[in-house]
Image (cartoon, rainbow, N blue to C red):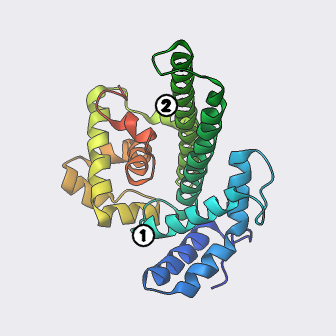
Amino acid sequence: MGFFPWTRKKPADEQESIAQAIRKIRGGNAAEREKLLEAYLPFILKVAAGVCGRYISRDNDEEFSIGLLALNEAIDSYDLDGKAPFLPFAKLVIKRRLVDYLRQQSKYRCEVSLDRFTGTEDGPAGGEAMFIARKAREEYAEEDRAFLLREEILAYREILAGFGISFQELTTVSPQHTDARQRARQIAKIIAADPEMSHHLMTKKELPLKHLAAVAAVSRKTLERQRKYIIALTLLHTGDFTYLQDYLREGKSE
């Protein structure tokens, strides 16, 4: 097949190569799975090193095994309907699994450190231990959420760039009136829920204006004026953006 992540292949060509490989894998081609995993081992190492803040060894670090399993999971769970690109999706899956692993390791170390306390849960020492453990869990959960939110923002920015949209533009292209923003959100949901229209958007990098104008009962002029804003919202709906999607809920973006 000839794909490899560190070549000068265009992103669209690489995405299509990966999609073809995943289709073969879904068809039962185990050799294709091994080939895809092997090709992206450097990708796993790079992502893992970024999460852990240090060099990751294929032979000596459990984090590499976690990353490999996560990439395999991404292959199985990736949506092939032409929505989000595979690599940003896979990066998020790998980072989430590594964060889960590191959080569990930190929790274990915290529990071990609490062994120095004695007494019952109701006693002075036991109460202090319970308080420390609870605070630690809260801190780990908050750090986890903040980390994953940052990673989703980076992945979202990368996907937006593929459509010629920057974060800076989002504040300027957002409709000023509440009803216009609500209408744009509804249009984005319509596109995301329609396989044909979402495929058109992801492959041609443009809104299916004619079809959309008829289905959404909105003028083509309005769609063209809000094009970038609608595309940005649709990409949030169709991508793996657990935390960013919170801001699409009613009231949060007003």
Q: Could you give the CA–CA distance between mark 2 and mark 1, rounded to whole angstroms?
A: 31 Å
On residue 171, the disc is: 2
Say whether residue 165 is visible: no
Q: Element type at marker 1?
A: loop
Please, what is the three-letter code of the amino acid marked with disc 2?
Answer: Thr
Residue drawn at x 49%, y 31% is 171
Name the one closer to the observer, 29 or 85: 29
Q: As drawn, which residue projects farthest toward the top?
A: 124
On residue 23, the disc is: none
Say whether residue 42 is visible: yes
Please, what is the three-letter code of the amino acid marked with disc 1?
Answer: Leu
The image quadrant that residue 206 belongs to is bottom left
| Crowd band around label 1 with a 10 angstrom C-alpha radius: few (<14), some (14–19), many (20+) | some
Name the one closer to the observer, 116 or 14: 116
Residue drawn at x 65%, y 37% is 109
Task: State which tag comes first along the sequence, 2 or 1.
Answer: 1
Q: As drawn, which residue projects farthest toward the front?
A: 119
In the depicted structure, whether residue 82 falls above or below residue 173 = below
Q: Position of residue 234 (x, y in %)?
A: 38, 49
The image quadrant that residue 61 belongs to is bottom right
Quarter in which the C terminus is drawn:
top left
In the depicted structure, whether residue 245 falls above or below residue 127 = below
Name the one closer to the observer, 66 or 28: 66
Mark 2 touches mark 1? (CB < 8 Å): no
Residue assigned mark 1: 80
- Total residue callouts: 2
